[in-house]
Image (cartoon, rainbow, N blue to C red):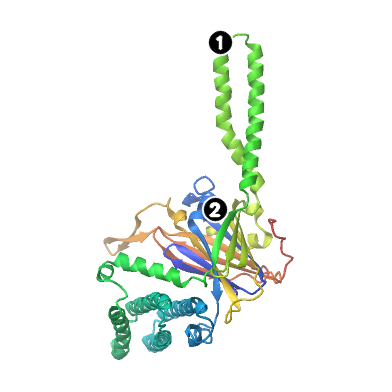
Amino acid sequence: MDNIKLTQDENLSIRVGYQLLPSDQQRLDLYFSIPEEMGINAKTLSEEQYFHHSIQCQSAYYSDQLHVPLVRSRFISQKKGEQSDYRLNLNLYSYQIRTALDTDIKQTIKLKDPKAFYPHAIELAEQTSGLLKKLRRYTPSDQKLRAYFENADNYLSWQVEQSFLKLLSRAPKTSDFTSEHQFLIGLCRRENQYRKENQYNSSVTLSDPNRITNKMRLLQRLIEYGVVFQKQVKNLNSYLNRLVKGTVTAIIMAFVMLLVLNARTNFTEVTIALVGMLGVIYGLREIFKEDITRLIWRRIQKGLPKWRLLYSHSVTKSKVARQTIWLEYISSKDLPKQIDKVFQTRRQQNKQAAKLLHFRSETKVNAKSFLPGYDEIQQRIYFNLTPFVRFLRKGEGRLYSLENQKITKQAVERRYQINVVMMHTNKARQQQIQRFKVTLNRSNIINIEAIDTPKDIEPKKTSATPSGETP
């Protein structure tokens, strides 16, 4: 799937990212097949709990031209445009450097051959140094603007050092590229010394890894101002939920009052039997009210969107995009035919009992144009899988084997597999379907493998389900 990617984000989280054009509209469906042995269901992990604690959505300006022409010196030159635009231009420049650096570092780490790794790393280091020089070439003299510059410069210098130290820690072991290794080490030392000379961070902050890391996270959020859109979350069914609760309570109370009146007519005096019967009636009301309300609410809410996310520009406050979210547990009979066929392509031993969790996102872009240099915005959705593994058993198993006359044992970890089917529908109602096998243990994701979709299943064009309906 070229338009959308599912990748690992951190130890136990995955990330889905795709781009949107002005006035664009796209839909994303994710079907999680979670083995029942994980203990995940609507009672142990509600949809609302998982959404608010483990799903994060982010929208920001995006360009696939990571180095040119977007990252250019005129964005941060005070001679171009109004001074009021300096902070926004500076953030655009800094954010794009960070994005480019993260992307290139990850690509370089994948190179296991030293002959390919070190030349690529040297080229990346030279490009990064050039971008930092352009940033520092336009140091503002205005003290108000200088504070913005120092925050961005401090963060980028630290991020460059950390990124290349991470790169070197995972470099292929060899003694043939000593000069290249020292060149990269020199870049890290220069950036470290640069921050000390400019007194960007106090000695107390530098002596505590937690303080310096948290400070850089704060600076990172500051450079995202104007680039990453502000998000407002709205619960779409809060009033409907109150109406359902009120209606169910009214019906139950009417029924209870009917029973009370009947009991009162049968007992002319207040007796122990009357008091006991009234206690039983009110006790049954408390027992069944919550269960009946929950059952009716799940029936009514089935297939309805639950949240709406409104994205707006941090500076102009104008509306940029709107995202509608569905999230619910479903049964296998609720699966669309093409999705069910994809799940059926699994091997027989992998078709174990599982719970199905369906996530849907419909994003509509309101803006008809973006800032100069940006033709797209990027939508990113992060799924934390930690709640899926919290009920798994700890420890490792043992594998015994017989070698000659000696019995040996090896420690083996318990691994679990979650199948994820992703369906992406664009504005032209063209669909792409991809299945992924996510292998994980209690501490991290071991592997994410994309499985080829059979040609007879992959749809080329479909009449997409209207917004607000469930297929």
Of tags 2 and 1, the one toward the viewer is: 1
Q: Are marks 2 and 1 in contact (CB under 8 Å)?
A: no
Amino acid carrying label 1: it is Thr
Going 29% across and 61% down the picture, which residue do you hit? Answer: 408
Percent position of residue 145, x then y: 43, 77
Going 60% across and 8% down the picture, which residue do you hit? Answer: 269
Q: Quadrant of the N terminus?
A: bottom right
Going 64% across and 35% down the picture, which residue do you hit? Answer: 248
Work out whether residue 465 can be spotted.
Answer: yes
Classify 181 as above or below 221. Answer: below
Q: Secondary structure at mark 1?
A: loop
Classify 219 as above or below 325. Answer: below
Classify 285 as above or below 434. Answer: above
Identify the residue under disc 2. 354
Label tally: 2
Number of other residues with Cα within 10 Å of mark 1, as a class: few under 14, some 14 to 19, many 20 or more: few
Work out whether residue 2 can be spotted.
Answer: no
Identify the residue under disc 1. 271
Percent position of residue 362, x then y: 64, 63
On the rendered structure, is 102 left or right of 206? right
Q: Whole-Å distance between the Cαs marked 2 and 1?
A: 54 Å
